[in-house]
Image (cartoon, grey):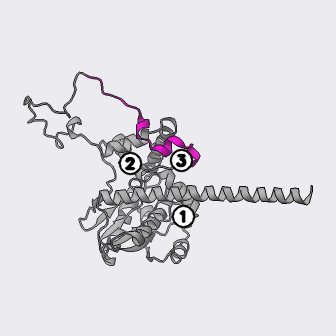
Amino acid sequence: MSTHSLNTHTDNASSDVLAAQKKQKYSFNKLEKRIRRAAGQAIEDFAMITDGDRIMVCLSGGKDSYTLLSTLQYFQKVAPIKFELIAVNLDQKQPGFPEHVLPEYLATQNVDFRIIEEDTYSIVKEKVPVGKTTCALCSRLRRGILYNTAKTLGATKIALGHHRDDILETLLLNMFHGGSMKSMPPKLVSDNGEHVVIRPLAYAREKDIVKYAEAMNYPIIPCNLCGSQENLQRKMIKDMLKTWDKQYPGRIESMFKALTNVVPSHLVDAELFDFKSLEANGIADANGDTAFDQPVVGSARAFLDDDDIAVDENTDVHILKL
């Protein structure tokens, strides 16, 4: 091979590498913007953050909480209001928990943080019989500790990293196993009435967060208490939703849209809608029931945006347009 041919080959290879890097950077920027836009829309829709807030960001070491923290840090820089962030991790003394990971990571992120050490693991193992679910007790203990920590820190909001898929999974879990139609609200008051809890990633898709966390190379910490019955049930529902997402594009988007478009008069909760006093009044109602008609079923693909339709699953990015 001549020197000229060798140089040409090297130049072509370099051009290919640069083109691939440029494409990868473009895809990452697009993904990051979509997650930020989804979070920004949720924050606006539910008035999650106000001027002067002191927000305690619960950091578990999973992909969702890392993404939550970085997203809120971005908004802290660009938002027209001022608010503080305090990252808090609860070290529950699970065997094998890498306690050095989060302090080392947070020390590089220019954010105030606290590591709270409480041995809830031993309490759970002592109180819960072998083979029984540990999630309920563990959750109650963790919640109480975090509420006390928020009070001590003077936090006005507690931010959690739950996303759109968590909300849908919880809805189906309650329907299948709890006999109720409820999910995770994007914003709520804590059960002790003392704290406002927010979920800024409520509109963000899990598969987008997975890609983002991989690109950011977050030091992920696995949960060592997983595997109890409740989590297995959630995993089954998660797998079902993933299957639907692949086989029926738009179905998940349609389901989530339904959570924002509830019609109490067309359900069967007599506490939610006053059926007893309902009478015909001779006035046409656009929301009235067409009792003898079959319900109109449209295409779930109508809930997909242009990117979902245009790109394949390997590069799919999306933001809900609610």
Question: Label 1: which residue?
Answer: 221
Q: Which of 279 and 148 is in front in this view?
A: 279
Report whether 4 appears left or right of 117. right
Q: What percent of the width, then of the height, locates residue 176?
A: 36, 40
* Residue 302 belongs to magenta span: yes
Circle 2/circle 1 CB separation < 8 Å? no
Q: What percent of the width, then of the height, locates residue 3?
A: 90, 60
Question: Label 3: which residue?
Answer: 316
Tell me where residue 279 sits by quadrant.
top left
Report whether 186 appears left or right of 273. right
Q: Is mark 3 on a helix, strand or loop?
A: loop
Q: What residue type is labelled 2?
A: Lys
* In the depicted structure, whether residue 282 falls above or below residue 181: above
* In the depicted structure, whether residue 200 falls above or below residue 286: below
Task: Tell me the tag on residue 321.
Answer: 2
| CA separation in Å, label 2 and label 1 | 32 Å
* In the depicted structure, whether residue 132 falls above or below residue 151: above
Q: What percent of the width, then of the height, locates residue 140?
A: 35, 62
